[in-house]
Amino acid sequence: MSSTKWQWLAALAVVLIGTSALLTSYLLSPERTPAGQPPLVFLSAQNLTSFKEAFNAAGAQTRLIAFLSPT
Amino acid sequence: MRGASALQEVLTKDKNPLSVYVVWEPVLPTDWKSPGTGTLGRLFDRRVRQFWDKEHLISAEMRKAAESYPSEIPVQRRRTNDKADGILWDAIAIFKPGAKWDTTMPVPKFLGGTVVKVIGDVEGQLSAAPRRNN
């Protein structure tokens, strides 16, 4: 194999490794809410009551629920 | 995403007592992961709590409430494909003080979307809302 081909393969490997590292970092990085807010809650049937409790605990106030998709 | 920024603009202007629950949910094919730090940062008001609702549980609870309590708000409003069994999304619901989640959620006094289109109505609802607490 010529040295040019080896150089191309090496460059491709670097790109693939870099992309994988970035993707892994993106997928594994913890989601952080802005300062002053509680951490992001991952809702499930098991902890749905925590949402209900928070909703009722603020019952003296107006409450707003926004339904959004992340993308 | 524009909806989140539009809502933050309203919150920046409205400093009255208010609790805000932002329910992020997968709807589009690109929503395969919970919102990242950048997305969460679009709503930076301290009155906000943010949730990732992968199973659309709150949407389902809202459906139960709409089916349990007759109101002027149709069940299918702001749901995917305009169907009652669709996912409630790109929408804002506002609940008046005193409304309590018992066996089902209370019916909101306002439900509308898309968020960008109704953000003026949302602002009006909040500014007109009674204030019972600080």
Image: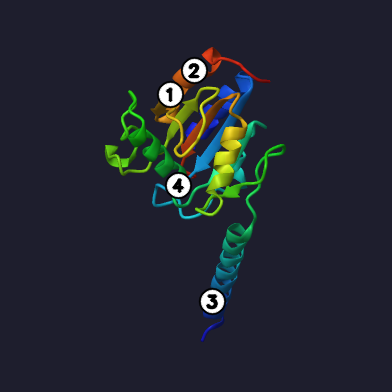
Local secondary structure at mark 4 = helix
Q: Residue at x 33, y 23 (%)?
A: B72
Q: Residue at x 68, y 38 (%)?
A: A37
Tag 1 subunit: B
> Are discs 4 and 2 less than 8 Å apart at CB?
no
Furthest-top residue in view? Answer: B128
Say whether mark 3 and mark 2 are on the same chain. Answer: no
- Report x, y in % for residue A19: 57, 64
Q: Amino acid at mark 2?
A: Gln
Disc 4: CA contacts within 10 A as few (<14), some (14-19) or many (>=20): some
Q: Amino acid at mark 1?
A: Phe
Disc 1: CA contacts within 10 A as few (<14), some (14-19) or many (>=20): some
Indicate which disc, 1 or 4, sits on the residue closer to the N terminus: 4
Q: Residue at x 34, y 26 (%)?
A: B73
Relative to residue B17, is residue B92 depicted above or below?
below
Which numbered disc covers residue A9? 3
Say whether mark 1 and mark 2 are on the same chain. Answer: yes
Find disc 1 in the rendering and name its residue: B110
